Each structure stands twice: as structure tokens, then as C-alpha cells.
Image (cartoon, helix red, strand yellow):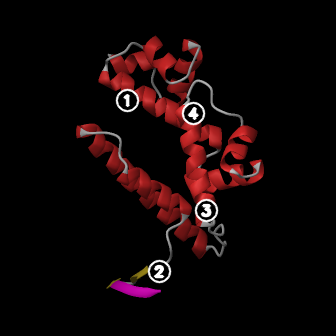
Amino acid sequence: MKHLVRQSTQLATARYATASPAMQAIARQILHCPYWGITKRIYLESKALELLAVIIAEEVEAQRGRVPLSPLPSEEVDRLHRAREILLRDLHHPPTLMDLAHQVGLNECSLKRGFRQVFGKTTFGYLLDYRLEQAYQLLFERHMNVEEVARKVGYANRRSFATAFRKKFGSSPKAILS
């Protein structure tokens, strides 16, 4: 630990460590921001806060003496990123975990464990969040109605889409259009 600043009785310190897979994933998302304008600014600010939250959470765990997950080999991280790309390629018919693992050359257990470690969510939790984030963006742009957006992001049933949307964002899809 290196002491940076001394203020009254509190001592600020810095710790040198490598970026965890979760931090690396957030950094990649920042570098490859898919938005523009005010949406880009909000997205980047939220990603910066997310990165800060991950750093703080990992520091708290380190101070409690808990050993962080061992870093994954870069080849496995690359396979997990490929799995994410495959998963997001077809929102209407995503592959099963077994098929996805087979396509990227991992076993199902490594895929599930690694996906959570790198992206901070389960495989299909990530897919669900991605679908809903895309839906929010489409509704915000106001080029489609709720039913069209639901179909576009892979929901066959408008009611299940509205329920998932409300659970994630706290308001109905129609409220975004208003």
C-alpha cells in the first residue's frame, strides 16, 4: 500500500493490482460505446460509475481477506467474449447453454462460471438485460411502437415483455413513449 494523502486522522491509500475480468469487460463496453449524443454521455457516465462500484466492491472483499476469483486465461476470456457475441447474434432464438459452450470450445460449467466472472451476470441474465436495454433505446428513439419493439428484441408475447421491462426499469414500455 502506498499512502497518497493524509487528512486529519484518515489515511488514503492506493493498491496496485491488475484489472479483474469484470473491470476489463466494463472497459471494453466503454471503448465500444454503441450510442451517440446525450445517450452516449449517460451511457459512459453510468459505465464509469459501474466500474467504480466494481473496484470498490473488490477492494472491500480484499480488505475482508477474501481471495478474489483467480484470473482466467486470456484464451478462455476470448472464448467467453465469442460466446457473448453468439448469444446476442440472434435474440429470437438464442442457443442453449450446451450448444453455446460447444460452439466456443468450453464445457457448460466453465461457460457458466466464466460468464459470471467476466460479465458479472449469468449467461441468460446478460441476454435478458441486453434485450431490455435495446428495447429501452428503441422506445426512447420513438421509431417503433411497443409491440414492434418487443418483437425486435426477441419477445413473442407483449405481456411478458411489458412485465420484464417494468421489473427492470420500474415503468411500463408505454411510459417511455409518452
Question: Which label's residue is closer to the chain start, 3 or 2?
Answer: 2
Q: Is residue 111 above or below residue 5?
A: above
Q: Which residues are magenta?
A: 1-5
- Give the CA separation, mark 3 to mark 1: 33 Å
Q: Is residue 9 above or below residue 160?
A: below
Near mark 1 (Cα within 10 A), the count class, few <14, some 14-19 or many ≥20, is some
- Give the CA separation, mark 2 to mark 4: 35 Å
Q: Amino acid at mark 2?
A: Tyr
Tell me the residue that label 2 is attached to: 16
Dominant secondary-structure state across the stretch colored magenta:
strand
- Give the CA separation, mark 2 to mark 1: 37 Å
Q: Residue at x 53, y 70 (%)?
A: 59
Question: Which label's residue is closer to the chain start, 3 or 1?
Answer: 3
Tell me the residue that label 1 is attached to: 137
Tell me the residue that label 3 is attached to: 75
Residue nearer the viewer, 105 or 72: 105
- Percent across and percent down for residue 43 are 35, 44
- Percent across and percent down for residue 101 are 71, 46
Question: Would residue 8 appear left or right of 163 to someone viewing this image?
Answer: left
Near mark 2 (Cα within 10 A), the count class, few <14, some 14-19 or many ≥20, is few
Q: Amino acid at mark 3?
A: Glu
For label 4, the SS is helix
Near mark 3 (Cα within 10 A), the count class, few <14, some 14-19 or many ≥20, is few
Q: Residue at x 67, y 33 (%)?
A: 95
Residue nearer the viewer, 174 or 106: 106
Question: Which label's residue is closer to the chain start, 2 or 1?
Answer: 2
Tell me the residue that label 4 is attached to: 128
Give the quadrant of residue 38.
top left
Q: Amino acid at mark 4?
A: Leu
